[in-house]
Amino acid sequence: MIGSGILSSEWVRFRRGLLCGTVSGLALVASPAFAANGQAAPAQAAESEADPGDIVVTAQKRAERLQDVPISIAVVGGETLSALNLNEATDLQYIVPGVQVLNAAGPRSFGFYIRGIGTTSFSSESVEGSVAYVMDGVVLGQSGASLADLPDIERIEVLRGPQGTLFGKNASAGVINVVTRRPSDHWEGRVSGSWAWPLNERKFSGLVTGPISDDVRVLFSARLNKRDGNVENVFDGRRLNNRNDYGFRGKIEATPGSNFTSTLIGDWWRRRSDCCIWTLRSVTVPPNAIEASQIAAGIVPSPTNEKQNVNGLVRSDIDSWGVSLDNEYETDSGYAISSITAFRSWHTIDGLDTDSSPTNIYDTNYADFDQRQFSQELRLTSPKGGLIDYVAGVFYFHSSVTSVSYQDNKSSAAAYAGRVVTNNATTDNYAVFGQANINVAKNFRLIAGARWLSETATANKLRLDTRSSATQFAQARKTDTGFVWRLGAQYDLSPDANVFATVTRGFKAGGYDTGIGFPELRNVDPEKPTNWEIGVRTSWPDAGLTVNLTAFHLTVDDYQISARAPGPTSIYYLINAAKLESNGVEGDITWRPRGDVDFTLSASASYMDATFKSFPNAQCYPGQTAAQGCVGGQQDISGTVLPHAPKFSANLQASYVDALGGGPVKLQLDANMNYRSATAQGFPVFDALIQPRYALVNASIAIASSDDFWQVQFFGRNLTDKNFATTIGGTVLGSAGNTQQYPLYEARRVIGVGFSLNF
């Protein structure tokens, strides 16, 4: 657990920041400029300028029409998630092309990949993922903290490519920007639930929101998700990889005047499950004793294998909570001042019996990981309409992590085969940023943005040999400075169409490999992407048609990538790939063929060719020989395919709503198909890690009252019962060349029924 001294300092930081945010808000309220003039709050004013049917996003830190934003963006509405009975962060990969999730072996190695770029590592004390996850304006410093459900969602914006100019931190590959629902100005509530077969999946949620005075509105939501495990443990009958989590969110929004809005948000989420274990996928070379024992126990290695045979614990406990204060003030002249002060805590105890046998070889293998973060962002947003409009601000982020890992390899007498490893790491990030449009003409603008940042990382590691009581200690400190910039131009072909071209240089600071398999702290260099984009945004309102297209050329220098050391080991470590390249095209089409009928068709697709442009010192894959290019434990994989980067992925969706006979009951039909081509699902890549192409078909039929007071839904996910895996790797303690997989609950047909009441 984290020390009381660190906790106290973190709490002091938060109290000071919260006090500053509150005082600044009160000062704004007391300012003479606050005299009521009939203006709406900043976000509300921007949304009021949009036409009905327009999608409003905050991808550039101000509310804008999606069609006006020169960034490749996919937007998923909360209604879409509900219609398809999807409510987990991991579900984004099934509806947004080009997005993949690595979700295996516990939350510390969780992460998103966009355009094939992402970093997942057990050394997350010091090194973050490459895709930033932002919840209501607050960036999460740990990728695993996003491994939660998605309650009361208004929309999710997936921003592809480096977004460091405005979002900073770990946004070198993209941003998942989650916007939750605001409190309502009238009282309303919702209760919903569902049950699905197989594995007894149960989901329940509730929400109530409304005004408690003329100036104050509140929202409170709660949810519960349970599911039996999809992996059968033949040793004792346990069901592993189950789901068991619940949480709450509350908001208080105050508008004491027409120019000022203050929102206090708090959330809490808990997970207690017997997760996350792998299963034997393929045995192509003679099995060793451990693999043979699984086969003797009746386990058949295959892509559909959902059986294990262990005697130890499989555990994933998470406690996550946070509080933030968002103050928004708009001056009479249209300038908006924003302050977001936030504190978050993420604690996980996770681990599993790694040896895949009922013998105590690696039964002790788990970690207690505690992260606390404080962030403060202050922004000034100019009004639009002048020669120059801009967003500028300052940002501070502090994270402290303490982890204690326990691992004991009973089959080895080597030093530190039994070990307790304590890691302490801190990160301090300071940044000044801004982005501006220079409106050369009414229909032509230049884009310029920059961010200067300084990030200091400290780490120390203490390893204890549990058998000899010997110790090893290492400590390190470094500061990385980076300059992120964005240049571009945008030309309006008409009020409903524009073209743009941009080039963006990103930066993700380095850190240290804190992995428990080594005594030292290995340096990890900063990751530096450069992204070129050219795109067109078009809409034909009379035809109900929108067509968007973006082409990109992305290179990343010193890509931070994690791989398992060759041989029968569970040691993972981080290195920098010299350079990678991802080229492709992304597009989406939305069509509403009839204005008098609620019928929408949409399609989105991503084509990318992602390869290692230069990687001469990559790890060898298990069993790789010198004849296959492995020399001294390394291989040159320059020009080979990137893992987690399907060459082609697509999503098709249809939604239809009709009042039956014009009466009090209506029918809603939703269908979705998600496709991805053959994909390497592990690293280092070899043939057995390739997941063949597959398509997932989801659909739902709902009957509801015309006023939406009640609804009954029948839904199906993966209706064609397609098996697939998103994570494949070599077996731990097994024979080189044999593979294991993380078996997904979604890799089967799921049929269910749901209900909702709105009041």
Image (tube, rainbow, N blue to C red):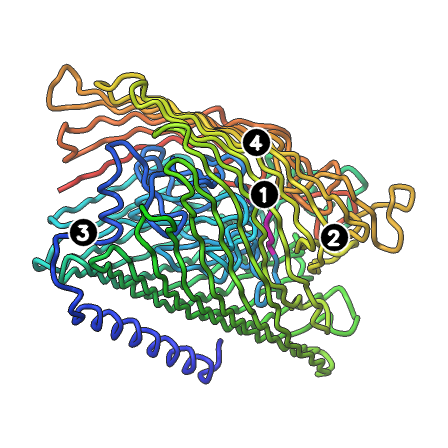
- Who comes first in sequence, dot 2 or dot 3? 3
* Mark nearer the viewer, 1 or 4: 4
- What residue would you read off at disc 1? 307
Between 215 and 568, the residue placed more toward the observer is: 215
Q: Measure how far apart labels 2 and 3 are at the Cα level.
A: 50 Å
Q: Quadrant of residue 676?
A: top right
Between 82 and 231, the residue placed more toward the observer is: 82
Residue 608 locus on image (x, y percent): 61, 34
Answer whether labels 2 and 1 touch (C-beta < 8 Å): no
Q: Is residue 231 visible?
A: no
* Mark nearer the viewer, 4 or 3: 3
- What residue would you read off at disc 3? 40
Tell me the magenta residue range. Answer: 114-120
Q: Measure how far apart labels 2 and 1 are at the Cα level.
A: 39 Å
- Name the residue type under label 3: Ala
| Point 34% across, 30% down: residue | 495
Q: Measure how far apart labels 1 and 3 are at the Cα level.
A: 58 Å
- Name the residue type under label 4: Val
Above or below, 415 against 186 in this view is below
- Who comes first in sequence, dot 1 or dot 4? 1
Above or below, 399 against 526 in this view is below
Q: Residues within 10 Å of mark 1 (few under 14, many from 20)?
A: many
The dot on residue 585 is 4
Residue 599 locus on image (x, y percent): 29, 21
